[in-house]
Amino acid sequence: MMNILITGTHSYIGSSLTEYLSRWPDNYHTSAISLRNDAWQSESFSAFDAVFHAAGLAHGSAKTIAHGEIS
């Protein structure tokens, strides 16, 4: 079984991938993590075979994204 970590807990792409891979529960196990705060830095990623990075900033102006003002 492949153990996959998906970043972007609420992302459309991450959610869709999780749903898609759930069709093969004997082949894939998915976990999701949010990167919105620094809590992810204390996690160990050694248990995962792959990381699918789907987190990102959206729906903000260039100024707010550049200054990290997106909530």
Image (tube, rainbow, N blue to C red):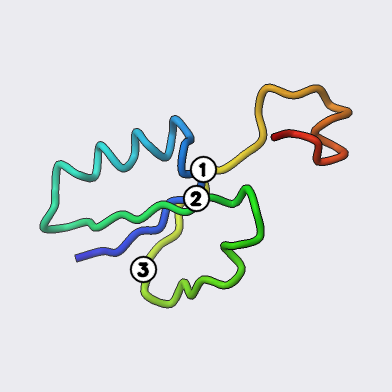
Tell me which amino acid carries mark 3.
Answer: Asp
| Residue 22, position as x, y percentages in the image | 19, 44
Q: Earlier in the sequence, mark 1 or mark 3?
A: 3
Q: Check contact, mark 2 vs mark 1: CB within 8 A.
A: yes
- Choose between 36 and 13: the one closer to the eye: 36
Q: 10 Å neighbourhood of mark 1: few (<14), some, or many (≥20)?
A: some
Q: Looking at the rendering, which quadrant does residue 29 occupy? A: bottom left
Tell me which amino acid carries mark 1.
Answer: Ala
| Residue 3, position as x, y percentages in the image | 30, 64
| Residue 68, position as x, y percentages in the image | 81, 41
Q: Quadrant of the C terminus?
A: top right
Residue at 24% x, 44% y is 21
Q: Earlier in the sequence, mark 2 or mark 1?
A: 2
Check disc 1 and report the residue beneath it: 54
Q: Looking at the rendering, which quadrant does residue 23 occupy? A: top left
Q: Is residue 42 left or right of residue 49?
A: right
30 to 62, vertically: above or below:
below
Mark 3: which secondary structure? Answer: loop
Check disc 2 and report the residue beneath it: 7
How far apart, in angstroms, are the residues tagged by discs 2 and 1?
A: 5 Å
Q: Looking at the rendering, which quadrant does residue 16 occupy? A: top left
The label on residue 26 is: none
Q: 10 Å neighbourhood of mark 2: few (<14), some, or many (≥20)?
A: many
Q: Is residue 36 left or right of residue 19?
A: right
Check disc 3 and report the residue beneath it: 49
67 to 6, vertically: above or below:
above
Q: 10 Å neighbourhood of mark 3: few (<14), some, or many (≥20)?
A: few
Mark 2: which secondary structure? Answer: strand
Q: Is residue 37 left or right of residue 30?
A: right
